[in-house]
Amino acid sequence: MARPREFDIEEVSLKAMHVFWHKGFEATSLTDLLEATGLSKSSLYDTFSSKRGLFLVAFELFRQERMKALKIHLNSKSNAYDSIESFFRLVLAHANQEEPIGCMSCNEAIELGPHDEEVQQLIAKDFQGIEDALVEAIERGKVDGSIPEFKDSRMHGRALTVTYQGLQVMARSRSVKERLNDALTVVLEALHK
């Protein structure tokens, strides 16, 4: 008879997520994961089958948590434009941290996306979810009057999604704050005017 699990899978996945997010999939060793999660090697393999199995669970957790936070933030202000701007200013603030880690999806799009079809599909689904949430916010902005009605919601949603991804990648490479701020300002002005 198998022994009952003595750990919380979500808690373990969250700890693993932070390791993968900071180090990337390839640079994360089994030792890193065992130390971060407190699991034994046999528990990790019994539960997740492999390092990759744990990565996929951790990556899905990242995607769900980030999407939940995105949707909350895109509804946080009295009008949609202010919510969108506030979200992107927060992204910029995180990008300017002493040790920016970027977005896990963006990081893995660069690291694993080119050669791992399953991860590539998860990333595409994630980026589409971001775009859809932004399009929905833009549509709300047209209703509340904070975004001009003639703006193409899908086109601006795509531009904002690419801006989000670009800010994350540029931040990870420690790009100059003013450069990121200038790019964001141009994209937000195009939406608002």
Image (cartoon, grey):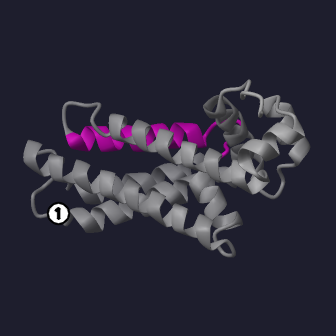
Q: Residue at x 17, y 53 (%)?
A: 139
The quadrant of the picture occupied by the N terminus is top right
Q: Residue furthest top?
A: 6
The location of residue 44, given as percent across then percent down, is: 80, 41
Q: Is residue 109 left or right of residue 186?
A: right
Examine the rendered structure and indicate whether residue 181 appears above or below residue 36.
below
- Say whether residue 48 is visible: yes
Identity of the residue drawn at 78% across and 48% down:
23
Examine the residues drawn in magenta and state their main secondary structure. Answer: helix
The one nearer the camera, 135 or 88, is: 135
Residue 123 horizontal side relative to residue 67, left or right: right
Residue 6 location in percent, x, y?
Answer: 74, 24
Examine the image and state in which quarter residue 34 appears. Answer: top right
Q: Which residues are magenta?
A: 80-102
Q: Is residue 174 visible?
A: no
Q: Residue at x 41, y 59 (%)?
A: 161
Q: Is residue 84 magenta?
A: yes
Q: Secondary structure at mark 1?
A: loop
- Reading the image, the residue beneath label 1 is 151
Q: Nearer the viewer, residue 74 or 46?
A: 46
Above or below residue 11? Residue 65 is below
Residue 89 shown left or right of residue 24 in the figure: left
Q: Nearer the viewer, residue 134 or 181?
A: 134
